[in-house]
Amino acid sequence: MTPAISRWSRTATISSSAGAAVAVVLAAVPYFAARAETALIDLFLFIALANLWNLLAGFAGLTSFGQQAYLGVGAYALYLYASAGVNPAFGVVLAALTAAVVSLPVSLLVLRLTAGYFAVATWVVAEVLRLLATVSPRVGGNTGVSLPGAGEYPLVLWQALTYWWALGLMLACVAGIALLMRSRFGLDARAVHFEPVAAAAAGVAVGRVRRVAYFLSALGTGAVGAVLFCHSLYVQPASVFGPQYSVYMLFMVLIGGLGTLEGPLLGALLFFGLQQFLAGYGPWYLVVLGAVAMLVTLFAPRGLWGAISGRWDVSLLPIGYRYRRS
């Protein structure tokens, strides 16, 4: 047997093919299972958020507690564009770009900080934006606003469009981040995550890597905020800028497996399942989530996918190189 270095595997081929088949089936859901649309939209958005937060914390080493800032920017940007006459179904793209543009000056401030200081600063930014939306009558203030233009669509068509937006966003986040992490940027990002000083000494542009990761995460999160607005048709500062979204993202990624591609997907599925099963149990829902988080942290510190891959040496979406004998 001769040693060889590979980046792909038969398992990855099977999982990618199965994922593509599942995506085709999911795209057809509005035609044969319309009642499932609402729940699946929530799941798709959870998966997108988990992957976007993992891009920051898991790959670039930027633990943010304030990504809800761009959820709110995306949602309110969609409102402003729709109020100006832009079709809300197409305004999602403009809203996402607006969130990304807002992230540029913010990144100049928060990326000067590291570790816990960065995390707190991002949360402060989200709170500042929430307060601005609360006191601004242009966006409804504390009472919130409804989405203009959505009523022009038949309800069935609007729900289907929102569903396809959520599905497309989820697929773009999963596939886009997978391709990004297999590129030179992915190698640089992981080096910055684990040893930023050594990475800088080796010639990696640490600041550029972090800015790109922050920009892309804001772009995707802004799109999620806009689709979330399309889904609920109503938004107010206390909800869309709420810190619960950071808690959700943190839970999904840490439970699934930080710094992996499969972990956020697994964590989002688990979180969604718990949410659906425990929705009627009131405060016990949060108690169970906390208990699950503690158990996984104690017995699987690398997350559920970390435990699975460590036990069976399997990777559904490999991003690094593997030594094998052929």
Image (tube, rainbow, N blue to C red):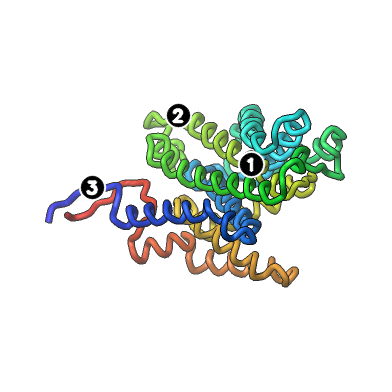
| Mark found first going from the N terminus, 2 or 3 | 3
Amino acid at dot 2: Ala
Q: How far apart are the two marked residues, 2 and 1, measured between alpha carbons?
A: 21 Å
Marking on residue 5:
3
Judged from the image, the secondary structure of the residue bearing numbered disc 3 is: strand
**Whole-percent x and y of residue 322?**
28, 50
Q: Is residue 248 above or below residue 61?
A: below
Most foreground residue, 168 or 316: 168
Residue under the point 70% across and 37% down? 88
Q: Where residue 218 sits: x, y (%)?
A: 60, 37
> Does residue 220 show up?
yes
| Secondary element type, mark 1 | helix
Residue on which disc 1 sits? 117
Q: Amino acid at mark 3?
A: Ile
Q: Are marks 2 and 3 in contact (CB under 8 Å)?
A: no
- Which amino acid, mark 1? Tyr
